[in-house]
Amino acid sequence: MTILDKIIAHKRREVADRQSLVPVKLLETSLYMEATPLSLRRYLLRDDLSGIIAEFKRKSPSKGVINAHAPVERTTLGYMQAGASALSVLTDTEFFGGKNEDLTTARRYNFCPILRKDFVVDEYQIIEAKSIGADAVLLIAAVLSGEEVLRLGRLAKSLGMEVLLEIHDAQELDKTLHPDAVSLVGVNNRNLHDFVVSLDTSGELAQRIPNDYVKVTESGLTSAADIRALREVGYRGFLMGEAFMRHARPELACAALVQQL
Ligand SMILES: O=P(O)(O)OC[C@@H](O)[C@@H](O)c1c[nH]c2ccccc12
């Protein structure tokens, strides 16, 4: 059993539990259900912004605790003041130390697209994402069939949210790329089964992703040089977490990097 299998098994139980505690009917009473989401796609295509999707992540299965103290308010607001294009907030508790309230807090402090970073396996989580104030959701091809991506993606779209489809190889891309459901494709440089990180993954897959999708490169990015090199091959979004979060003041690390772009 890989760590990814463990995460997914846990997630299925968690979603079942939560669904009985907070039924969809209750989620639907959230005021955020009526909000019009911001387009991640459009923000990433803006030439006056960096393209950075700055992530709030306290810990991860591969790195353990990254930052236990940084507050969501100051960090996310600081990320945006530093020149990030959008935010990503981990909401998984068990493995990443996040929670739904982190996203809602980020929502209250920022006017920008927010990606809900979690392991989506059920429609319930899509409605939940909308109810906590997310603008976009991540769907991970390594854990979903093509049909599931289509079904979950269409639901997200019907609620006005955009879908970032995460892939790690060409096979996953071919299996799950549905123009109807997906607006952005993210290449995860980290293999979720064994955690090996290589930016070459993004380099190799760039040309295989049709240009109608906004291309995002995820994980293992540490420098302005990484961003410049991947922008050169077609990426418009740069998802970065640890490189910022391992500093006591992640937002200052983000500002320092943006200065170098
Ligand atoms: O901290 P990094 O190496 O900059 O990576 C950020 C982000 O790409 C990573 O957190 C991530 C990418 N895909 C995921 C899926 C689930 C949880 C986390 C992730």
Image (cartoon, rainbow, N blue to C red):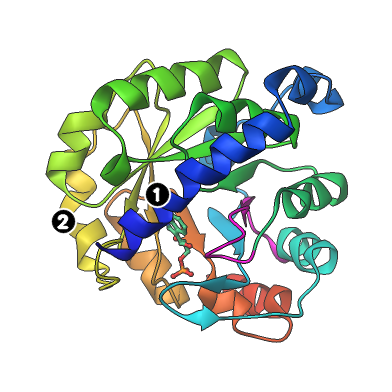
Q: CA distance from mark 2 to mark 1?
A: 28 Å
Residue at 48% over, 47% down: 11
Q: Which residue is mark 1?
A: 8
Q: Secondary structure at mark 2?
A: helix
Which amino acid type is marked by label 2? Glu
| Mark 2 surroundings within 10 Å by alpha-carbon count, few (fewer than 14), some (14 through 19), many (20 or more) | few
Q: Is residue 141 visible?
A: yes
Instruction: Please tell me which residue lies in front, 229 or 221.
Output: 221
Residue underneath mark 2: 204
Q: Is residue 33 above or below residue 100?
A: above
Label 1, secondary structure: give it: helix
What residue range appears in magenta? 82-97
| Residue 72, magenta (yes or no) | no
Give percent across and percent down for residue 237.
46, 50
Q: Does 193 appear above or below 37?
A: below
Determine whether, in the image, residue 116 is placed left or right of residue 226: right
Instruction: Return the residue nearer the eye: 28 or 90.
Output: 28
In terms of secondary structure, what is the magenta stretch mainly? loop
Residue shown at the point (68%, 77%) measured from the top left? 250
Q: Report the number of discs.
A: 2
